[in-house]
Image: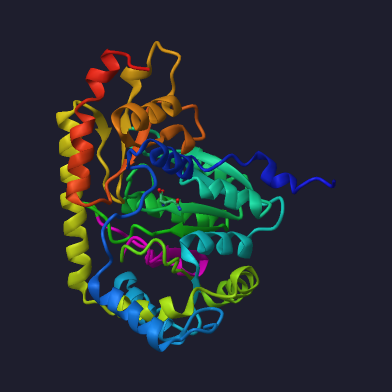
């Protein structure tokens, strides 16, 4: 038999999806793969029912239904402070996952380099490899997740085609400061690179931090491909609705890539989502309020359990330091995560899957869950120390 594509030979199973499988196997509360266990807004569900009853049921325009793009352009123009044109600046995709892949395939030729901050959301590495590009990793060192501007400049000096910027960041919860973004902007300009953003947590940024859309920095719209999705904002991760926003020349390329990859995102779901895109700003304030409470609730449990963590500034993840539990043992974060699922009944993701550096002392929990789920998980977390001391296998 001929051999498979060599590029995928190095791919391991996603650490995130693997932990979901293990959580299900042991019946553990799944705080690994980040998705809500609560319903989307009722008005959106109703709009979904209407769309299923009345249509559309056939293909939408490949780069997105017109009413979806109009509603999205109005919302993002308001938030980003830019004049987003629904007909020239948007491609609607199957989630931000497709948006990121489209962005990469739009700008990268085989052999190009792409800067990726580490820790990183695991898809970026795969996106780079699938598009024939070579990732250059730049560390965001815990606990502050700052980057060294000199190290970043050295990476830019290798003339990457693009840098991937996840802000707010998964898994660290870092929200990049204006100063950091301006450093990235200066270097992208100096070395003439594109900036591909993943801003799916744009509405989950905890005070006093604020989200700054990279494309809204002076002069940056022209070289930025902004990717985001409706998954986190409207609690519809399974609807697979995302988007690319970029200048017309890049959109022209992105439309073609997207068309050949997927033709389009689900037409009835695009129709339904128009309702959500037209929600008033109060909706986003309330969403943030809810996540602020969830963060406080879950971090409260970590405090009570005596587990140390890095305070997330945005998104809905928290990295917990498990160094003290594995130091001097043969165990690593992968073992510990499985042990958590098996013995404690709460499943995190091993942190090493997110780091390019040999960092083994973190596990990632997510807190996009109902308070009762977080409380049930929290009660179990109180057992971690006792169980570790008893060194239960
Ligand atoms: N973004 C979510 C996470 O990091 C979900 C990932 C996925 O499985 N698509 O957990």
* Residue 255, above or below 13: below
User: Can you see residue 177?
Assistant: yes
User: Residue 200 location, x and y as percent?
Assistant: 38, 59
Name of the residue lying farthest toward the bottom: 54
User: Residue 177 location, x and y as percent?
Assistant: 31, 50
The range drawn in magenta is 210-233
Assess whether residue 229 is covered by the magenta stretch: yes
Say left or right for 48 vs 313: right
Taking the spot 36% from the left edge, 79% from the top edge, the residue there is 272
Q: Nearer the viewer, residue 384 or 92?
A: 384
Q: How many marks?
A: 0
User: Residue 282 location, x and y as percent?
Assistant: 17, 71
User: Can you see residue 207?
Assistant: no
The C terminus - image quarter: top left
* Residue 82, above or below 321: below
Name of the residue lying farthest toward the top: 328
User: Residue 43 location, x and y as percent?
Assistant: 25, 76
Say left or right for 187 vs 338: right
């Amino acid at each position: 038999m001929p051999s498979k594509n060599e590029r995928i030979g190095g791919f391991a199973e996603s650490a995130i999806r693997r932990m979901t499988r293990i959580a299900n196997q042991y019946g553990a509360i799944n705080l690994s793969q980040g998705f809500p266990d609560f319903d989307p807004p009722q008005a959106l569900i109703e709009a979904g029912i209407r769309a299923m009853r009345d249509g559309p049921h056939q293909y939408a325009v490949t780069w997105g239904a017109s009413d979806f793009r109009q509603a999205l352009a109005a919302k993002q123009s308001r938030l980003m402070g830019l004049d987003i044109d629904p007909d020239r600046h948007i491609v609607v995709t199957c989630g931000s996952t497709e948006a990121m892949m489209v962005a990469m395939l739009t700008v990268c030729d085989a052999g190009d380099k792409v800067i990726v901050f580490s820790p990183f959301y695991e898809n970026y590495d795969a996106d780079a490899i699938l598009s024939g590009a070579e990732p250059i990793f730049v560390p965001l060192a815990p606990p502050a997740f700052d980057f060294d501007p000199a190290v970043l400049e050295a990476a830019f000096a290798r003339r990457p085609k693009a840098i991937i910027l996840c802000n707010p960041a998964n898994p660290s919860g870092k929200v990049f400061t204006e100063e950091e973004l301006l450093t990235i902007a200066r270097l992208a300009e100096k070395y003439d690179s594109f900036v591909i953003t993943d801003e799916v947590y744009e509405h989950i940024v905890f005070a006093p931090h604020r989200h700054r859309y990279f494309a809204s920095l002076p002069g940056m719209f022209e070289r930025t491909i902004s990717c985001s999705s409706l998954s986190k904002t409207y609690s519809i991760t399974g609807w697979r609705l995302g988007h690319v926003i970029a200048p017309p020349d890049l959109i022209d390329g992105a439309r073609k890539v997207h068309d050949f990859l997927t033709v389009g995102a689900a037409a009835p779901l695009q129709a339904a989502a128009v309702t959500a895109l037209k929600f008033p700003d109060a909706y986003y304030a309330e969403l943030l309020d809810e996540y602020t409470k969830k963060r406080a609730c879950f971090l409260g449990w970590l405090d009570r359990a005596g587990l140390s963590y890095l305070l997330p500034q945005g998104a809905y993840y928290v990295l917990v330091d498990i160094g003290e539990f594995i130091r001097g043992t043969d165990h690593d974060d992968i073992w510990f995560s499985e042990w958590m699922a098996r013995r404690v009944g709460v499943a995190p993701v091993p942190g090493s899957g997110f780091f390019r550096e040999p960092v083994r002392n973190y596990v990632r929990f997510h807190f996009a869950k109902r308070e009762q789920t977080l409380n049930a998980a929290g009660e179990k977390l109180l057992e971690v120390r006792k169980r570790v001391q008893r060194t239960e296998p």
